[in-house]
Image (tube, rainbow, N blue to C red):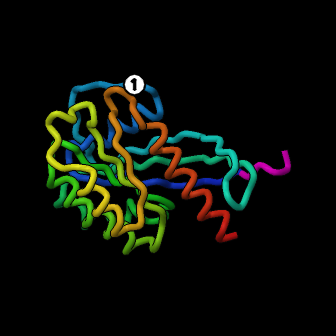
Amino acid sequence: MADRKTLKSKVCLVGEIAVGKTSLIRRYVQDMFDDKYIMTIGTKISKKTVRLEGVRGAHDVTLDMTIWDIMGEKGFRQLLKEAYFYGANGILAICDLTRTNTLEDLDDWIDHVLKVVGEIPVYIVVNKVDLKEGAKFDDDAVRAFAKAYNAPWSYASAKTGENVQDAFEAIGRAMAEQQMSAK
């Protein structure tokens, strides 16, 4: 099909330790969930090919998405930034609905990535919506935070799968549109 473009994109998942970055990726790529916590050491890279229809700048896009799962330890952030953030086309910034500091700390994560790669799409994911009875912040807090980055956001649950595919597809679409407009 002449109207289909193939693009390669790198998306970095960032956020504090235990917000569910690895679980979100596992749910998206393998449609699996495991509630045993295993800390990511360094980074883990996954891949998924996504077909996007009606992308601005192209009719349809096949997006070869490389998904970088980056450890959430604050002490390693400085070490990580050059090696892991370089070449990123988008950021999925993950926070945990049951821990206020994880939303507040996203500023540092996002800013570190943007300093390395420049302006790229950001999408905020408030994970663990399945635990909403333990919520420590509300829509207004997320909306105010996301506004600073002109970023869309949504709730999601790696456990139930709610909105996980939508979030990855949204950042994929934003990355594809930015890449197409740069051509």
The mark tally for this picture is 1
Residue 42 seen anywhere in this rendered image of the structure:
no
Q: Residue at x 26, y 46 (%)?
A: 41
Q: What secondary structure prevails in the magenta region?
A: loop
Give the extent of the magenta segment.
Answer: 1-5
Q: Which residue is mark 1?
A: 32
Q: For residue 19, which quarter of the picture?
A: top left
Between 172 and 38, which is closer to the camera in this rendering? 172
Three-letter residue code for mark 1? Met
Between 183 and 135, which is closer to the camera in this rendering? 135
Q: Is residue 52 above or below residue 7?
A: above
Q: Position of residue 166 (x, y in %)?
A: 48, 41
Q: For residue 150, which quarter of the picture?
A: bottom left
Where disc 1 sits, the SS reads loop
Between 181 and 34, which is closer to the camera in this rendering? 181
Q: Position of residue 33 (x, y in %)?
A: 34, 25
Q: For residue 164, which quarter of the picture?
A: top left
Q: Residue at x 59, y 64 (%)?
A: 178
Q: Is residue 89 above or below residue 162?
A: below
The N terminus - image quarter: top right
* Residue 40 relative to residue 63: left or right: left
Q: Which residue reaches farthest front? A: 140
Q: Residue at x 46, y 41 (%)?
A: 46
Q: Residue at x 73, y 56 (%)?
A: 58
The C terminus - image quarter: bottom right
- Residue 41 is inside the magenta segment: no
Q: Position of residue 169 (x, y in %)?
A: 53, 44
Q: Position of residue 129 (x, y in %)?
A: 28, 36
